Amino acid sequence: MELTHQWQGYSFTFWLFRLMAGSRVGCYVHYPTISTDMLGRVEHAAATAAAASADGQNAPVNEQHNNRRVIQSSRSLSRIKLVYYRLFARLYGIMGAGAQVVIANSSWTRDHIASLWRPAQLDVVYPPCNTTHLLANPIDSEREPIIISIAQFRPEKDHPLQIRAFARALKNRLIPDQYAATCSLVLIGSCRNAEDQERVEQLQELARSVRVLRSTASLLQQLRLTDASIGGARA
């Protein structure tokens, strides 16, 4: 086999194809299996738990989807998890080094892959997006103050943080007065399963609780862009 091109995330097969099949290995990476962000989060939790334990206090806990409360509050469990993450990251880096040509789909992924795999050749190719139909939208008409966030409704995207930040911006009058009354936060994404759908319902309930439901919307499975002023982030 002369060439193996892999885009499903099976980095632990790189050396198998390279050494046993004699292939040149190339890959297109969407999202690293482990990231330096994950390592940093666990390192911070481990340090916090250790400091709290030394003072005879309970560690402050901010539960996240990949760092459970029971682990964060335990000094020993946090250390065990940190060792596991470091070992896995090291092994992931060794396996990733088997790829001779590496392409990332974003600058964020590129930076993490560069840190973990340290490939000799690393490029970025952004996912293609056909914007031809958007050319029909006028750009000189009056626009609406809309903040758009595009991301699947997955726990790691932290949509609740976006809603809370938007609510705080309104409360603290960080949005100019001429836009505050009509400014909207629009969360656009898709649901993979029933859990994601339930997550959307929880986001709607959160929007009610922080009193921004009227200016927060969720659009599932589709994206419609009108002549709106877009200030937001692709998560």
Image (cartoon, rainbow, N blue to C red):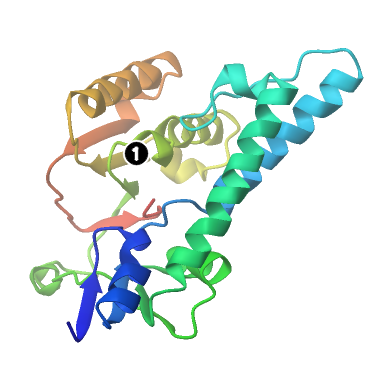
Q: x, y percentage for residue 112?
A: 52, 63
* Vertical placement of residue 123 versus 142, above or below: below
Left or right, 162 with reference to 24: right
Name the kind of residue labelled 1 in the image.
Ser
Return the residue at label 1: 184
Q: How many marks?
A: 1
| Residue 179 in view in this figure | yes
- Quick check: 189 above or below 26? above
Q: Residue 188: image x %, image y %?
A: 25, 43
Task: Tell me the SS state at disc 1.
Answer: strand
For the point 10% across and 74% down, which residue is it? 132
Name which quarter of the figure residue 200 lies in.
top left
Res. 125 in view: no
Foreground residue among 224 and 154: 154
Residue 22 vs residue 82: left or right? left
Q: In the displayed structure, would residue 180 be above or below residue 103?
A: above
Q: Nearer the viewer, residue 154 or 47?
A: 47
> Picture quarter containing residue 130?
bottom left
Rendered location of residue 30, percent (x, y):
33, 61
Mark 1 Cα within 10 Å, few/some/many (few <14, many 20+)?
many
**Is residue 40 placed above or below 5 in the rendered structure?**
above
Residue at (24% x, 24% y) in the render: 195
Question: In the rendered view, does 75 fall on the left or right side of 162?
Answer: right
The residue sitting at the right extreme is 55
- Quadrant in the rendering for residue 215: top left
Along the line of sight, the residue nearer the viewer: 177 or 94? 94
Residue 218 location, x and y as percent?
24, 34
For image coordinates 54% across by 23% down, the residue present is: 68
Q: Is residue 134 left or right of residue 73?
A: left
The residue at 59%/16% (across/down) is 70
The quarter in which the N terminus is drawn is bottom left
